[in-house]
Image (cartoon, rainbow, N blue to C red):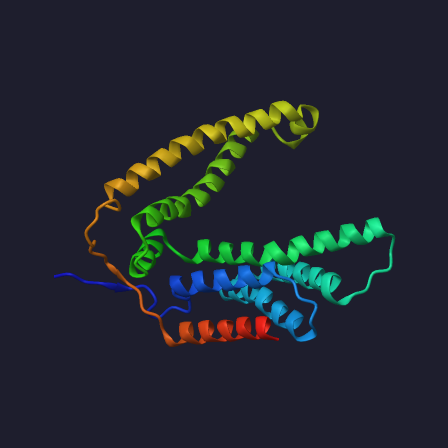
Amino acid sequence: MNKTMDINKGSLLLDPRTKMCLMFIVSIISLTGSEAVPAIYIRLLVMLLPIVLLLTIKKFIQSILCASIIMVAWMVESVIYINYAPIYTLILFITAGIVTRFLPALLMGYYILKTTEVATFITSLEQMHCPRKLTIPLSVMFRFIPTIKEEGQAIKRAMKMRGIDYKYALLHPLKYLEFRVVPLLNSVIKIGNELSMASITRGLTLQHARTNMITLTIRAVDWIVIIVMMLLGILYYVI
């Protein structure tokens, strides 16, 4: 007897399709800058959404740190008038602009990686009727990014066991960089090939519909979040 698993049942996590919608809205609004008084506060609310989502998965230290950085950068960019030398003013505004435009999207991506499994992500793409040419590369990259981090940590531990630490990096920076980068590149190439073969083995290249043990449902909380974010986006561009 076939059984399906509702991945969202009894969970506070959002549906993967909701997360992708939020990723799009947060990225678009964060990248645009507006000097109008209502719009800058709407933009701040949108930029702080990833912080709220990180709090739901108990990333308290990261949330407080990133919220402080975003708030300071937003104030420098939108509220505070700085009367310094032009070069210092330019550096401050460029730094603040980079933070406010890219950090919220990076935090949203971090939240998606931490709360979404590969199988769930693939299922959500299939239910959105995305083509396989998009599904397969995204699924491989979705698993590829955490694997790179794990390989980097393994290489760092292996180097530490051989006495190659930060002190050695200060004395021999080029050799230290070589010891870190070359093994990582070899691992990346090998892992990329293995993930591609695994995706083909699991039938991701088949043209007909695949059976799946996971069922995704957009719940009331998903609709509320989507509607609120869409309203904020409309108000941001209309006002």
* Residue 20 falls in image quadrant: bottom left
Viewer-nearest residue: 205 or 172: 205
Relative height, residue 99 to residue 224 (above, below) = above
Q: Is residue 91 left or right of residue 236?
A: right
* Residue 21 falls in image quadrant: bottom left
Residue at left 83%, top 60%? Answer: 82
Instruction: Examine the rendering and report whether any part of residue 177 can be seen.
Output: yes
The single residue placed furthest to the left in the displayed view is 1
Where is residue 73 drawn, in percent x and y?
Answer: 70, 59
Q: Quadrant of the N terminus?
A: bottom left
Viewer-nearest residue: 16 or 67: 16
Relative height, residue 231 to residue 138 (above, below) = below
Instruction: Examine the rendering and report whether any part of residue 57 can be seen.
Output: no
The single residue placed furthest to the front in the displayed view is 238
How many numbered markers are drawn? 0
Residue at left 30%, top 49%? Answer: 132
Residue at left 61%, top 68%? Answer: 43
Q: Is residue 96 left or right of residue 109?
A: right
Q: Is residue 236 left or right of residue 88?
A: left
Residue at left 23%, top 58%? Answer: 213
Relative height, residue 131 to residue 180 (above, below) = below
Where is residue 42 drawn, in percent x and y?
Answer: 61, 72
Where is residue 117 drawn, in percent x and y?
Answer: 37, 54
Viewer-nearest residue: 106 or 165: 106
Q: Quadrant of the C terminus?
A: bottom right
Q: Is residue 180 left or right of residue 39?
A: left
